[in-house]
Image (cartoon, helix red, strand yellow):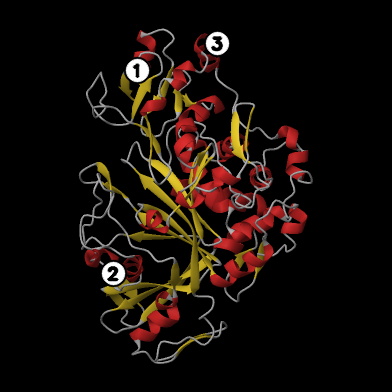
Amino acid sequence: MSARLQKHPDPCNHLSDYKLRHGTDGYKSFQNMFRCFNDGRIIIKLDTPPRCTHCNKNKRLYICLICRSISCSSHLLSHTQSNKGHDLSIDIERSELYCSSCFDQVYDPDFDVAVVSKQLMVKDVVVGFRSNKKRRLLLESSQLIIGSSQLFVDRREKWSFPLGLRGLNNLGSTCFMNAVLQALVHAPPLRNFWLSGQHNRDLCERRSLGLLCLPCDLDLIFSAMFSGDRTPYTPAHLLYSWWQHSTNLATYEQQDSHEFFISLLDCIHENEGKTKCLYKDHEECQCITHRAFSGLLRSDVTCTTCGSTSTTYDPFIDISLTLDSSTDCRKNRNSGEPSVNKAAMPTLSGCLDLFTRSEKLGPDQKLNCQSCGDKRESSKQMSIRRLPPLLCLHVKRFEHSLTRKASRKIDSYLQYPFRLNMSPYLSSSIIGKRFGNRMFAFDGEGEYHHHDGSSSSLSSSAEFEIFAVVTHSGMLASGHYVTYLRLKGLWYRCDDAWINEVEEEVVRGCECYMLFYAQERVIQKAHKELSYQVISMADAFPFADC
Protein backbone atom coordinates (compact mmCIF):
# COMPACT_ATOMS: atom_id res chain seq x y z
CA MET A 1 0.00 0.00 0.00
CA SER A 2 2.76 2.44 0.92
CA ALA A 3 4.31 2.10 -2.52
CA ARG A 4 1.20 3.63 -4.06
CA LEU A 5 1.12 6.64 -1.74
CA GLN A 6 2.36 9.68 -3.61
CA LYS A 7 4.16 12.05 -1.24
CA HIS A 8 4.67 14.91 -3.64
CA PRO A 9 3.35 15.72 -7.10
CA ASP A 10 5.76 15.02 -9.93
CA PRO A 11 7.74 18.20 -10.72
CA CYS A 12 6.77 19.94 -13.92
CA ASN A 13 9.24 20.11 -16.82
CA HIS A 14 9.69 23.85 -16.33
CA LEU A 15 10.73 23.33 -12.71
CA SER A 16 13.16 20.58 -13.73
CA ASP A 17 14.69 22.82 -16.42
CA TYR A 18 15.01 25.69 -13.97
CA LYS A 19 16.84 23.56 -11.40
CA LEU A 20 19.18 22.18 -14.07
CA ARG A 21 20.20 25.72 -15.00
CA HIS A 22 20.13 27.43 -11.60
CA GLY A 23 20.03 24.72 -8.94
CA THR A 24 18.76 26.16 -5.67
CA ASP A 25 20.68 29.46 -5.94
CA GLY A 26 17.53 31.25 -7.09
CA TYR A 27 15.67 30.05 -4.00
CA LYS A 28 18.45 31.17 -1.68
CA SER A 29 18.52 34.64 -3.23
CA PHE A 30 15.04 35.25 -1.80
CA GLN A 31 15.85 34.15 1.77
CA ASN A 32 16.34 37.66 3.13
CA MET A 33 12.95 38.65 1.72
CA PHE A 34 10.93 36.01 3.57
CA ARG A 35 9.05 37.27 6.64
CA CYS A 36 7.41 34.89 9.13
CA PHE A 37 4.35 35.88 11.20
CA ASN A 38 3.27 34.49 14.55
CA ASP A 39 0.41 32.55 12.96
CA GLY A 40 2.87 30.67 10.73
CA ARG A 41 2.35 32.61 7.51
CA ILE A 42 5.46 33.38 5.48
CA ILE A 43 5.28 36.16 2.90
CA ILE A 44 7.75 38.00 0.71
CA LYS A 45 8.49 41.40 2.20
CA LEU A 46 9.53 44.08 -0.30
CA ASP A 47 10.89 47.56 0.35
CA THR A 48 7.80 49.15 -1.24
CA PRO A 49 4.20 47.89 -1.43
CA PRO A 50 4.12 45.49 -4.40
CA ARG A 51 2.03 46.22 -7.47
CA CYS A 52 1.67 44.58 -10.85
CA THR A 53 4.13 46.08 -13.35
CA HIS A 54 1.50 45.71 -16.08
CA CYS A 55 -1.68 47.14 -14.53
CA ASN A 56 -0.41 48.68 -11.26
CA LYS A 57 -2.99 46.70 -9.24
CA ASN A 58 -2.23 44.95 -5.95
CA LYS A 59 -4.46 41.87 -6.28
CA ARG A 60 -2.94 38.33 -6.07
CA LEU A 61 0.70 39.04 -6.98
CA TYR A 62 3.60 36.85 -8.08
CA ILE A 63 7.33 37.65 -8.31
CA CYS A 64 9.37 36.07 -11.11
CA LEU A 65 12.18 33.78 -9.95
CA ILE A 66 14.44 35.01 -12.78
CA CYS A 67 13.97 38.77 -13.14
CA ARG A 68 11.90 39.55 -10.00
CA SER A 69 9.27 41.26 -12.09
CA ILE A 70 5.93 41.45 -10.28
CA SER A 71 2.75 40.38 -12.08
CA CYS A 72 -0.84 39.85 -11.01
CA SER A 73 -2.68 36.64 -11.82
CA SER A 74 -4.14 38.25 -14.96
CA HIS A 75 -0.75 39.25 -16.43
CA LEU A 76 1.48 36.43 -15.20
CA LEU A 77 1.08 34.39 -18.39
CA SER A 78 1.84 37.36 -20.64
CA HIS A 79 5.09 37.94 -18.73
CA THR A 80 6.08 34.31 -19.29
CA GLN A 81 5.23 34.44 -22.99
CA SER A 82 7.29 37.60 -23.42
CA ASN A 83 10.30 36.25 -21.55
CA LYS A 84 11.47 32.75 -22.45
CA GLY A 85 12.30 30.62 -19.44
CA HIS A 86 10.47 32.85 -16.96
CA ASP A 87 7.89 30.18 -16.15
CA LEU A 88 8.32 30.03 -12.38
CA SER A 89 7.29 32.63 -9.86
CA ILE A 90 6.55 32.91 -6.14
CA ASP A 91 3.19 33.82 -4.69
CA ILE A 92 4.06 36.91 -2.63
CA GLU A 93 1.35 36.43 -0.02
CA ARG A 94 1.91 32.71 0.47
CA SER A 95 5.55 32.05 -0.48
CA GLU A 96 4.63 29.14 -2.76
CA LEU A 97 5.93 28.22 -6.21
CA TYR A 98 3.69 28.65 -9.22
CA CYS A 99 4.26 27.67 -12.86
CA SER A 100 2.42 30.01 -15.21
CA SER A 101 2.95 27.71 -18.20
CA CYS A 102 1.32 24.77 -16.40
CA PHE A 103 -1.32 27.02 -14.78
CA ASP A 104 -0.62 25.18 -11.55
CA GLN A 105 1.12 25.38 -8.23
CA VAL A 106 4.28 23.26 -8.10
CA TYR A 107 5.87 21.68 -5.07
CA ASP A 108 9.61 21.43 -4.47
CA PRO A 109 10.96 20.40 -1.04
CA ASP A 110 14.18 22.29 -1.83
CA PHE A 111 12.14 25.48 -2.01
CA ASP A 112 10.56 24.75 1.38
CA VAL A 113 14.03 24.29 2.87
CA ALA A 114 15.04 27.69 1.49
CA VAL A 115 11.89 29.32 2.82
CA VAL A 116 12.35 28.26 6.42
CA SER A 117 16.12 27.82 6.74
CA LYS A 118 16.56 31.40 7.94
CA GLN A 119 13.87 30.95 10.59
CA LEU A 120 15.39 27.64 11.70
CA MET A 121 18.51 29.51 12.82
CA VAL A 122 16.69 32.00 15.04
CA LYS A 123 13.16 30.68 15.55
CA ASP A 124 11.25 27.45 15.95
CA VAL A 125 10.05 26.72 12.43
CA VAL A 126 10.40 23.29 10.82
CA VAL A 127 9.56 22.33 7.25
CA GLY A 128 6.03 20.98 7.13
CA PHE A 129 5.39 22.06 10.73
CA ARG A 130 5.88 25.66 11.83
CA SER A 131 5.39 25.96 15.59
CA ASN A 132 4.85 28.84 17.99
CA LYS A 133 6.67 30.02 21.12
CA LYS A 134 5.57 26.95 23.08
CA ARG A 135 7.83 24.88 20.81
CA ARG A 136 11.06 26.87 21.25
CA LEU A 137 12.62 24.08 23.23
CA LEU A 138 11.89 21.70 20.38
CA LEU A 139 14.98 22.57 18.36
CA GLU A 140 17.16 22.12 21.43
CA SER A 141 15.80 18.71 22.34
CA SER A 142 14.70 17.29 18.96
CA GLN A 143 16.85 15.68 16.33
CA LEU A 144 16.68 17.38 12.94
CA ILE A 145 17.17 14.86 10.19
CA ILE A 146 18.59 16.29 6.98
CA GLY A 147 18.49 14.19 3.84
CA SER A 148 16.65 13.77 0.56
CA SER A 149 16.00 17.53 0.66
CA GLN A 150 13.77 17.16 3.74
CA LEU A 151 13.86 18.58 7.27
CA PHE A 152 11.57 17.13 9.87
CA VAL A 153 11.35 16.40 13.56
CA ASP A 154 11.96 12.82 14.61
CA ARG A 155 8.41 11.63 15.21
CA ARG A 156 9.55 9.49 18.12
CA GLU A 157 10.04 12.70 20.15
CA LYS A 158 7.42 13.31 22.83
CA TRP A 159 6.92 16.82 21.41
CA SER A 160 5.73 15.51 18.06
CA PHE A 161 2.34 16.70 16.85
CA PRO A 162 -0.80 14.54 17.25
CA LEU A 163 -1.12 11.56 14.98
CA GLY A 164 -3.20 12.50 11.95
CA LEU A 165 -1.80 16.01 11.50
CA ARG A 166 -0.34 16.10 8.01
CA GLY A 167 -0.22 18.76 5.34
CA LEU A 168 -2.04 18.48 2.01
CA ASN A 169 -0.38 19.64 -1.18
CA ASN A 170 -2.19 22.28 -3.20
CA LEU A 171 -2.90 20.95 -6.69
CA GLY A 172 -3.64 24.37 -8.14
CA SER A 173 -6.24 26.51 -6.35
CA THR A 174 -7.43 23.49 -4.34
CA CYS A 175 -7.16 25.06 -0.89
CA PHE A 176 -10.98 24.86 -0.76
CA MET A 177 -10.69 21.05 -0.89
CA ASN A 178 -7.76 20.78 1.52
CA ALA A 179 -9.52 22.92 4.12
CA VAL A 180 -12.62 20.69 4.17
CA LEU A 181 -10.61 17.46 4.10
CA GLN A 182 -8.66 18.48 7.19
CA ALA A 183 -11.91 19.06 9.07
CA LEU A 184 -13.46 15.77 7.92
CA VAL A 185 -10.35 13.70 8.60
CA HIS A 186 -10.50 14.79 12.25
CA ALA A 187 -14.27 14.42 12.63
CA PRO A 188 -14.56 11.53 15.14
CA PRO A 189 -17.39 9.52 13.49
CA LEU A 190 -15.84 9.73 10.01
CA ARG A 191 -12.34 9.04 11.27
CA ASN A 192 -13.43 5.96 13.19
CA PHE A 193 -15.58 4.74 10.28
CA TRP A 194 -12.69 4.63 7.80
CA LEU A 195 -9.90 3.65 10.15
CA SER A 196 -11.93 0.72 11.50
CA GLY A 197 -12.21 -0.67 7.96
CA GLN A 198 -15.95 -0.17 7.47
CA HIS A 199 -15.15 0.83 3.90
CA ASN A 200 -12.08 -1.10 2.83
CA ARG A 201 -10.76 -0.20 -0.62
CA ASP A 202 -9.17 -3.64 -0.96
CA LEU A 203 -12.59 -5.30 -0.57
CA CYS A 204 -14.72 -2.74 -2.43
CA GLU A 205 -16.85 -4.26 -5.21
CA ARG A 206 -16.86 -1.07 -7.30
CA ARG A 207 -13.09 -0.87 -7.23
CA SER A 208 -12.75 -4.56 -8.15
CA LEU A 209 -14.84 -3.81 -11.25
CA GLY A 210 -12.54 -0.98 -12.24
CA LEU A 211 -15.07 1.73 -11.31
CA LEU A 212 -14.26 4.98 -9.56
CA CYS A 213 -15.15 4.96 -5.88
CA LEU A 214 -14.80 8.14 -3.87
CA PRO A 215 -15.11 6.38 -0.47
CA CYS A 216 -12.13 4.24 -1.53
CA ASP A 217 -10.15 7.41 -2.20
CA LEU A 218 -11.16 8.70 1.23
CA ASP A 219 -10.03 5.40 2.73
CA LEU A 220 -6.64 6.01 1.13
CA ILE A 221 -6.51 9.55 2.54
CA PHE A 222 -7.43 8.49 6.08
CA SER A 223 -4.79 5.74 5.97
CA ALA A 224 -2.17 8.17 4.70
CA MET A 225 -3.02 10.90 7.20
CA PHE A 226 -2.78 8.51 10.17
CA SER A 227 0.23 6.58 8.88
CA GLY A 228 2.66 8.67 10.93
CA ASP A 229 4.30 10.10 7.79
CA ARG A 230 4.73 13.86 8.19
CA THR A 231 5.52 14.81 4.58
CA PRO A 232 2.65 16.59 2.77
CA TYR A 233 0.20 14.25 1.07
CA THR A 234 -1.26 14.75 -2.41
CA PRO A 235 -5.04 14.02 -2.64
CA ALA A 236 -4.99 13.77 -6.44
CA HIS A 237 -7.13 10.63 -6.68
CA LEU A 238 -9.90 12.17 -4.60
CA LEU A 239 -9.89 15.34 -6.67
CA TYR A 240 -10.26 13.31 -9.87
CA SER A 241 -13.10 11.20 -8.43
CA TRP A 242 -14.89 14.31 -7.23
CA TRP A 243 -14.53 15.89 -10.67
CA GLN A 244 -16.20 12.83 -12.22
CA HIS A 245 -19.14 13.24 -9.84
CA SER A 246 -19.39 17.04 -10.08
CA THR A 247 -18.53 17.72 -13.70
CA ASN A 248 -19.80 21.29 -13.49
CA LEU A 249 -17.09 22.03 -10.92
CA ALA A 250 -14.27 20.15 -12.66
CA THR A 251 -11.90 23.07 -13.22
CA TYR A 252 -8.64 24.34 -11.75
CA GLU A 253 -10.40 27.54 -10.69
CA GLN A 254 -10.98 28.29 -7.01
CA GLN A 255 -14.20 26.75 -5.71
CA ASP A 256 -16.32 27.38 -2.64
CA SER A 257 -15.44 25.23 0.37
CA HIS A 258 -19.07 24.98 1.45
CA GLU A 259 -20.17 23.79 -2.00
CA PHE A 260 -17.38 21.23 -1.98
CA PHE A 261 -18.43 20.03 1.49
CA ILE A 262 -22.03 19.48 0.36
CA SER A 263 -20.94 17.86 -2.90
CA LEU A 264 -18.47 15.54 -1.17
CA LEU A 265 -21.02 14.34 1.38
CA ASP A 266 -23.45 13.74 -1.47
CA CYS A 267 -20.82 11.60 -3.20
CA ILE A 268 -20.32 9.53 -0.05
CA HIS A 269 -24.08 9.16 0.33
CA GLU A 270 -24.52 7.91 -3.23
CA ASN A 271 -21.88 5.24 -2.70
CA GLU A 272 -22.66 4.27 0.89
CA GLY A 273 -26.39 5.05 1.18
CA LYS A 274 -28.58 2.44 2.87
CA THR A 275 -32.16 3.25 3.74
CA LYS A 276 -33.65 2.09 6.99
CA CYS A 277 -36.60 3.51 8.90
CA LEU A 278 -35.60 4.61 12.39
CA TYR A 279 -38.44 7.06 13.10
CA LYS A 280 -42.17 6.77 12.69
CA ASP A 281 -42.63 9.23 9.85
CA HIS A 282 -39.13 9.56 8.42
CA GLU A 283 -36.81 7.23 6.61
CA GLU A 284 -33.26 7.70 7.84
CA CYS A 285 -30.30 6.89 5.62
CA GLN A 286 -27.65 4.87 7.42
CA CYS A 287 -24.65 6.02 5.39
CA ILE A 288 -21.85 7.59 7.40
CA THR A 289 -22.70 11.04 6.00
CA HIS A 290 -26.18 11.07 7.49
CA ARG A 291 -25.26 9.22 10.67
CA ALA A 292 -22.73 11.96 11.40
CA PHE A 293 -24.25 15.18 10.00
CA SER A 294 -27.98 14.62 9.51
CA GLY A 295 -30.44 16.49 11.70
CA LEU A 296 -34.09 17.51 11.39
CA LEU A 297 -35.54 21.01 11.06
CA ARG A 298 -39.07 21.98 12.02
CA SER A 299 -40.90 24.70 10.08
CA ASP A 300 -44.08 26.23 11.54
CA VAL A 301 -46.23 28.45 9.31
CA THR A 302 -48.93 30.19 11.36
CA CYS A 303 -52.02 31.96 10.07
CA THR A 304 -52.06 35.49 11.51
CA THR A 305 -55.88 35.54 11.39
CA CYS A 306 -56.92 32.40 13.25
CA GLY A 307 -53.60 31.21 14.69
CA SER A 308 -53.69 27.72 13.17
CA THR A 309 -50.27 26.26 12.36
CA SER A 310 -49.01 24.05 9.56
CA THR A 311 -45.88 22.09 10.48
CA THR A 312 -43.36 20.41 8.17
CA TYR A 313 -40.05 18.64 8.84
CA ASP A 314 -36.97 18.72 6.63
CA PRO A 315 -33.62 16.95 7.05
CA PHE A 316 -30.41 18.97 7.04
CA ILE A 317 -26.68 18.26 7.04
CA ASP A 318 -25.63 21.83 7.75
CA ILE A 319 -27.22 25.15 8.73
CA SER A 320 -26.47 28.35 6.81
CA LEU A 321 -26.54 31.45 8.98
CA THR A 322 -26.94 35.09 7.97
CA LEU A 323 -24.69 37.61 9.69
CA ASP A 324 -26.67 40.15 11.70
CA SER A 325 -26.68 43.27 9.50
CA SER A 326 -27.51 45.55 12.44
CA THR A 327 -23.80 45.73 13.29
CA ASP A 328 -21.12 46.44 10.73
CA CYS A 329 -17.95 45.08 12.27
CA ARG A 330 -15.27 44.90 9.63
CA LYS A 331 -11.74 43.81 10.34
CA ASN A 332 -8.89 46.30 10.16
CA ARG A 333 -6.72 45.14 7.28
CA ASN A 334 -3.55 46.40 8.95
CA SER A 335 -3.97 44.96 12.43
CA GLY A 336 -6.44 42.18 11.66
CA GLU A 337 -8.49 43.31 14.66
CA PRO A 338 -12.19 44.26 14.60
CA SER A 339 -12.77 47.96 13.99
CA VAL A 340 -15.60 48.35 16.53
CA ASN A 341 -15.97 47.55 20.20
CA LYS A 342 -16.77 44.00 21.20
CA ALA A 343 -20.23 44.90 22.47
CA ALA A 344 -21.33 45.66 18.89
CA MET A 345 -19.79 42.60 17.28
CA PRO A 346 -22.05 40.00 15.63
CA THR A 347 -22.19 36.77 17.60
CA LEU A 348 -22.99 33.20 16.69
CA SER A 349 -25.84 33.19 19.20
CA GLY A 350 -27.24 36.27 17.45
CA CYS A 351 -27.08 34.47 14.10
CA LEU A 352 -28.88 31.44 15.56
CA ASP A 353 -31.49 33.73 17.13
CA LEU A 354 -32.01 35.28 13.70
CA PHE A 355 -32.35 31.82 12.13
CA THR A 356 -35.03 30.74 14.62
CA ARG A 357 -36.84 34.09 14.82
CA SER A 358 -40.43 34.29 13.61
CA GLU A 359 -40.71 36.25 10.36
CA LYS A 360 -43.73 37.58 8.55
CA LEU A 361 -44.13 36.18 5.05
CA GLY A 362 -44.79 38.47 2.09
CA PRO A 363 -48.13 38.92 0.30
CA ASP A 364 -47.04 36.50 -2.42
CA GLN A 365 -46.53 33.75 0.19
CA LYS A 366 -50.01 33.70 1.72
CA LEU A 367 -50.99 30.51 3.51
CA ASN A 368 -53.94 28.51 2.22
CA CYS A 369 -55.45 28.22 5.70
CA GLN A 370 -57.70 25.18 6.12
CA SER A 371 -59.37 26.68 9.19
CA CYS A 372 -60.25 29.97 7.49
CA GLY A 373 -60.93 28.36 4.13
CA ASP A 374 -59.02 31.14 2.35
CA LYS A 375 -55.53 32.42 1.70
CA ARG A 376 -54.24 34.39 4.67
CA GLU A 377 -51.12 36.27 5.66
CA SER A 378 -48.85 34.15 7.79
CA SER A 379 -45.61 34.01 9.75
CA LYS A 380 -42.89 31.37 9.63
CA GLN A 381 -40.55 30.11 12.33
CA MET A 382 -37.73 27.60 12.07
CA SER A 383 -36.45 25.40 14.89
CA ILE A 384 -34.34 22.28 15.28
CA ARG A 385 -36.29 19.09 15.95
CA ARG A 386 -33.25 16.81 16.18
CA LEU A 387 -29.54 17.63 16.43
CA PRO A 388 -26.87 15.58 14.64
CA PRO A 389 -23.72 14.25 16.35
CA LEU A 390 -21.69 16.66 14.21
CA LEU A 391 -23.04 20.16 13.64
CA CYS A 392 -21.77 22.19 10.68
CA LEU A 393 -22.66 25.90 10.77
CA HIS A 394 -22.06 27.79 7.53
CA VAL A 395 -21.64 31.58 7.77
CA LYS A 396 -22.96 33.34 4.68
CA ARG A 397 -20.07 35.61 3.69
CA PHE A 398 -20.78 35.85 -0.03
CA GLU A 399 -23.71 38.03 -1.14
CA HIS A 400 -25.12 37.93 -4.67
CA SER A 401 -27.43 40.78 -5.70
CA LEU A 402 -29.73 40.07 -8.66
CA THR A 403 -30.80 43.71 -8.94
CA ARG A 404 -27.28 45.12 -8.96
CA LYS A 405 -25.92 42.03 -10.73
CA ALA A 406 -22.90 42.07 -8.44
CA SER A 407 -21.35 39.95 -5.72
CA ARG A 408 -19.40 40.91 -2.63
CA LYS A 409 -17.77 39.31 0.39
CA ILE A 410 -18.81 40.20 3.94
CA ASP A 411 -15.69 40.71 6.05
CA SER A 412 -17.55 41.18 9.33
CA TYR A 413 -15.96 39.71 12.41
CA LEU A 414 -18.01 37.04 14.20
CA GLN A 415 -17.70 36.01 17.83
CA TYR A 416 -18.31 32.30 18.37
CA PRO A 417 -17.91 30.06 21.43
CA PHE A 418 -15.75 26.97 21.66
CA ARG A 419 -18.53 25.35 23.71
CA LEU A 420 -22.02 25.77 22.28
CA ASN A 421 -25.36 25.06 23.97
CA MET A 422 -28.00 24.44 21.29
CA SER A 423 -30.92 23.98 23.73
CA PRO A 424 -32.42 27.47 23.08
CA TYR A 425 -32.80 26.65 19.37
CA LEU A 426 -34.51 23.28 19.73
CA SER A 427 -38.17 22.98 18.80
CA SER A 428 -39.00 22.13 22.41
CA SER A 429 -37.60 25.49 23.52
CA ILE A 430 -38.91 27.58 20.60
CA ILE A 431 -42.45 26.22 20.76
CA GLY A 432 -42.40 26.32 24.54
CA LYS A 433 -41.71 30.06 24.48
CA ARG A 434 -44.56 30.55 21.99
CA PHE A 435 -46.95 29.01 24.50
CA GLY A 436 -45.70 30.99 27.48
CA ASN A 437 -42.90 28.61 28.52
CA ARG A 438 -45.36 25.87 29.44
CA MET A 439 -44.18 22.27 29.43
CA PHE A 440 -44.08 21.05 25.85
CA ALA A 441 -43.49 17.54 24.55
CA PHE A 442 -42.82 15.91 21.19
CA ASP A 443 -44.41 12.57 20.47
CA GLY A 444 -42.09 9.62 20.34
CA GLU A 445 -38.86 11.36 21.34
CA GLY A 446 -39.35 12.08 25.03
CA GLU A 447 -38.13 15.67 24.73
CA TYR A 448 -39.50 17.86 27.50
CA HIS A 449 -38.86 21.52 28.08
CA HIS A 450 -39.90 23.01 31.44
CA HIS A 451 -40.81 26.56 32.35
CA ASP A 452 -37.45 27.10 34.08
CA GLY A 453 -35.59 26.35 30.87
CA SER A 454 -34.26 22.96 31.96
CA SER A 455 -34.41 19.92 29.71
CA SER A 456 -34.90 16.51 31.19
CA SER A 457 -33.36 14.46 28.35
CA LEU A 458 -31.71 16.88 25.92
CA SER A 459 -29.18 18.61 28.15
CA SER A 460 -26.31 16.28 27.28
CA SER A 461 -26.97 15.95 23.54
CA ALA A 462 -27.42 19.72 23.08
CA GLU A 463 -23.94 20.55 24.41
CA PHE A 464 -21.33 20.85 21.65
CA GLU A 465 -17.58 21.43 21.46
CA ILE A 466 -15.81 22.95 18.49
CA PHE A 467 -13.18 20.84 16.71
CA ALA A 468 -12.57 22.62 13.39
CA VAL A 469 -12.94 26.07 11.83
CA VAL A 470 -12.65 26.69 8.08
CA THR A 471 -11.73 30.31 7.35
CA HIS A 472 -11.69 32.45 4.23
CA SER A 473 -9.35 35.40 3.82
CA GLY A 474 -8.94 37.78 0.93
CA MET A 475 -11.35 38.90 -1.73
CA LEU A 476 -14.30 37.15 -3.34
CA ALA A 477 -12.47 36.03 -6.49
CA SER A 478 -8.96 35.50 -5.12
CA GLY A 479 -9.31 34.39 -1.51
CA HIS A 480 -7.69 31.57 0.40
CA TYR A 481 -9.08 28.85 2.70
CA VAL A 482 -7.34 27.68 5.88
CA THR A 483 -8.52 25.26 8.58
CA TYR A 484 -7.89 25.46 12.31
CA LEU A 485 -8.10 22.13 14.16
CA ARG A 486 -8.55 21.69 17.89
CA LEU A 487 -6.84 18.54 19.12
CA LYS A 488 -6.29 17.73 22.79
CA GLY A 489 -7.05 21.32 23.75
CA LEU A 490 -4.45 22.81 21.37
CA TRP A 491 -5.10 24.63 18.09
CA TYR A 492 -3.30 23.85 14.82
CA ARG A 493 -3.40 25.89 11.64
CA CYS A 494 -3.60 23.77 8.47
CA ASP A 495 -2.64 25.84 5.43
CA ASP A 496 -2.30 23.34 2.59
CA ALA A 497 1.11 21.67 3.05
CA TRP A 498 1.96 23.72 6.14
CA ILE A 499 0.88 23.01 9.72
CA ASN A 500 1.71 24.99 12.82
CA GLU A 501 0.44 25.33 16.36
CA VAL A 502 -1.27 28.66 17.12
CA GLU A 503 -2.67 30.44 20.12
CA GLU A 504 -6.39 30.52 20.83
CA GLU A 505 -6.53 34.28 20.08
CA VAL A 506 -5.48 33.64 16.48
CA VAL A 507 -8.44 31.32 15.96
CA ARG A 508 -10.90 33.72 17.57
CA GLY A 509 -9.70 36.54 15.33
CA CYS A 510 -10.11 34.73 12.00
CA GLU A 511 -12.86 35.21 9.41
CA CYS A 512 -14.75 32.01 10.13
CA TYR A 513 -16.67 30.53 7.21
CA MET A 514 -17.59 27.05 8.42
CA LEU A 515 -17.75 26.00 12.06
CA PHE A 516 -17.64 22.30 12.95
CA TYR A 517 -18.98 21.26 16.36
CA ALA A 518 -19.33 17.78 17.86
CA GLN A 519 -21.58 16.68 20.70
CA GLU A 520 -19.63 16.54 23.95
CA ARG A 521 -20.34 12.85 24.33
CA VAL A 522 -18.83 12.24 20.86
CA ILE A 523 -15.70 14.21 21.76
CA GLN A 524 -15.35 12.42 25.11
CA LYS A 525 -15.68 9.01 23.51
CA ALA A 526 -13.21 9.98 20.79
CA HIS A 527 -10.62 10.90 23.42
CA LYS A 528 -10.93 7.42 24.90
CA GLU A 529 -10.71 5.73 21.51
CA LEU A 530 -7.80 7.63 20.02
CA SER A 531 -4.25 7.59 21.35
CA TYR A 532 -2.10 10.41 19.98
CA GLN A 533 1.01 8.31 19.65
CA VAL A 534 2.60 6.54 16.71
CA ILE A 535 1.05 3.12 17.21
CA SER A 536 -0.77 0.72 14.97
CA MET A 537 -4.22 1.70 13.78
CA ALA A 538 -5.65 -1.55 15.07
CA ASP A 539 -4.58 -0.60 18.59
CA ALA A 540 -5.55 3.05 18.23
CA PHE A 541 -9.09 2.49 16.95
CA PRO A 542 -10.68 -0.46 18.77
CA PHE A 543 -14.24 0.84 18.38
CA ALA A 544 -16.10 0.81 15.11
CA ASP A 545 -19.07 2.96 16.06
CA CYS A 546 -18.94 6.73 16.17
CA neighbours of label 2 inside 10 A, class few (<14), some (14 to 19), many (20+): some
Left or right: where does residue 333 sit relative to residue 291? left
Residue 359 picture quarter: bottom left
**Which amino acid, mark 3?**
Leu
Image location of residue 212, percent across then percent down: 67, 38
Between marks 1 and 2 in the image, the one whose residue lies nearer the viewer? 1
Label 3: which residue?
20
Label 1: which residue?
68
Q: State the residue at coordinates (38%, 27%).
A: 32
Q: Nearer the viewer, residue 420 or 368?
A: 420
CA neighbours of label 1 inside 10 A, class few (<14), some (14 to 19), many (20+): few
Q: Nearer the viewer, residue 315 or 355?
A: 355
**Which amino acid, mark 1?**
Arg
Residue 190 picture quarter: bottom right
Q: Secondary structure at mark 2?
A: loop
The numbered mark at residue 175 is none
**Which amino acid, mark 2?**
Lys
Q: Is residue 412 above or below residue 521?
A: above
Residue 121 in sight in this render: yes
Distance from disc 2 to disc 3, alpha carbons, whole Å, reads: 72 Å
Label 2: which residue?
366
| Quadrant where the image shows the C terminus | bottom right
Left or right: where does residue 171 sit relative to residue 222? left
Q: State the residue at coordinates (33%, 71%).
A: 353
